[in-house]
Amino acid sequence: MNACLIRHTRVNVATGVCYGRMDVGLADGFAAEAETVRRALPWEPEEIWTSPLTRCRMLAERLATGRIAMREDERLMELNFGEWEGRRWETFRGPESEAWASDPWGRRPPGGETGLELWARVASVRREVLARATERRVAVVTHAGVIRVWRALAAGGSPGGGVFDARVGYGEITPAG
């Protein structure tokens, strides 16, 4: 396969804060982390797709070094947590968050999106990326939620189960089958 998924590097956000689609800054040490990612790539990409959020776009720009085609795509953005974004998780614990936690596929945070909506947009962008990857080496810089769903799609899975439980480390590179 000529495609890989890359999670953005560490962010400058306090532990325990819900940041989903919030455009947050990168942690100190970004340059070194980006270089580690670049060296770990299985090949030099010919095309890079990225979430438009700064934490992904900056890594994509580092990897592109001005000579590789880059494409921003909103379908690669993290799950939209709506009104919960920017708040500590414990500040919105209650019936609404418990209902969402029991069914993140069918329920949405206030002003956010459902897991099924995330699933649909990841499935859509995945088809396009994999079609491009038959001709070119494509790197996709995105978020943990997107990568979790992409992996489940690649495995022939369906929404539900432990899709959201899978661990995806900062700067982790995954084959994009």
Image (spheres, rainbow, N blue to C red):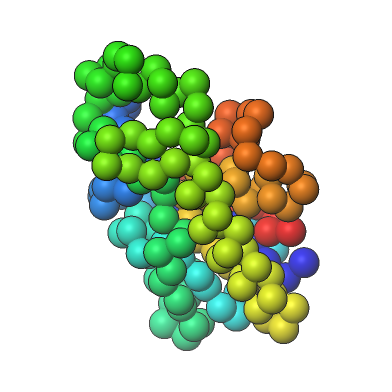
Asked whether the viewer can see residue 74, the reply is: yes
Q: Residue at x 45, y 23 (%)?
A: 101
| Of the pair 28 and 151, the residue shown nearer to us | 151
The total number of labels drawn is 0
Residue 79 vertical position relative to residue 66 in the rendered view, above or below: above
In the displayed structure, does residue 111 sit left or right of residue 59?
left
| Of the pair 65 and 8, the residue shown nearer to us | 8
Q: Position of residue 115 (x, y in %)?
A: 49, 41
Asked whether the viewer can see residue 32, the reply is: no
Q: Residue at x 41, y 55 (%)?
A: 77
Can you name the residue that lies furthest to the front here? 106
Q: Residue at x 77, y 48 (%)?
A: 156
Quadrant where the image shows the N terminus = bottom right
| Of the pair 41 and 122, the residue shown nearer to us | 122
Q: Position of residue 167 (x, y in %)?
A: 58, 33
* Residue 50, quarter of the rendered image: bottom left
| Of the pair 117 and 13, the residue shown nearer to us | 117
Quadrant where the image shows the C terminus = bottom right
Q: Residue at x 68, y 59 (%)?
A: 176
Residue 124 vertical position relative to residue 30 in the rendered view, above or below: below
In the displayed structure, does residue 136 sit left or right of residue 52?
right
In the displayed structure, does residue 23 sit left or right of residue 79?
left
Q: Position of residue 2 (x, y in %)?
A: 72, 70
